Amino acid sequence: MIPPQKSIRYDRYEFKKWTSFDAETIVETPVSLTVNGEVWITFMCTPIELEAMAVGFLFNEEIIQTMDEVEDVRLCEHGDNVDVWLNRLVEQPTSWRRTSGCTGGVTAVDLLAKPNVSFAEKKLRVDPDAITNLVEMLFESQELYRDTGGVHTSALSDGKRVLVAADDIGRHNTLDKVAGLCLMKSIWPETRILITDK
């Protein structure tokens, strides 16, 4: 397994002298996704919650809709590949597009297509104080950020509490991890609010 952080020693110059410090820094590493025995893609990510990221990526890419389609998901012993076995044949997308971000994510979804989402049926009303409280809860859940800095956190809420949260050096990866955690834990609240840091 690859740890999500590593110890470093650095020197800082201030007040006309050098001082050495020990610190923790975030890790970014390549991790491949294998679907039904075929390598699909390699993510650049923080090596935690990798099974959730793989499942969430397949969900967000509209390859799967539920966990019922997943026969098995497991991280290899070296931590650099996630194997996902589905109960049906799927074709690997023929082209991937790079998304925005530091190292960027990838998608095969048509970025110009209009999303199939309607907000007309039900208007969600959230008290401003509730949003402030949810943001505070997000900050409280950022343990890895407090240890290392340089990492994003996203969380899903039902409007009252944080249900799942995920950390990664790439914000797009946190969204896949959140989706995967929801699928794997069967968490789909009626009210869904996504919170992420800047």
Image (tube, rainbow, N blue to C red):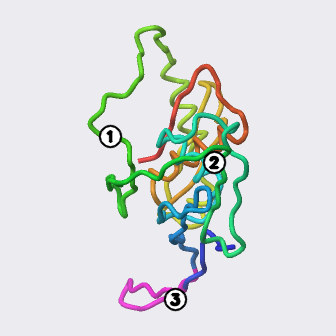
Q: Nearer the viewer, residue 164 or 62?
A: 62
Determine the image quadrant of residue 188. Answer: top right
Magenta segment, principal secondary structure?
A: strand
Q: Amino acid at mark 2?
A: Ser
> Going by the image, does 34 lie left or right of 105?
right
Residue 63 numbered tag: none
The reply to whether residue 139 is in sight is no
At mark 3, the secondary structure is strand
Name the side, left or right, on which 83 lies relative to 151.
right
Residue to which mark 1 is pinned: 110
Q: Secondary structure at mark 1?
A: loop
Magenta stretch, residue numbers: 9-22
Query: Which residue is more in the foreground, 150 or 103?
Result: 103
Label 2 to label 3: alpha-carbon separation: 30 Å
- Residue 76 lies, with reference to residue 128, above or below; the image says below
Find out whether residue 17 is within the magenta segment. yes
Q: Which residue is mark 3?
A: 20
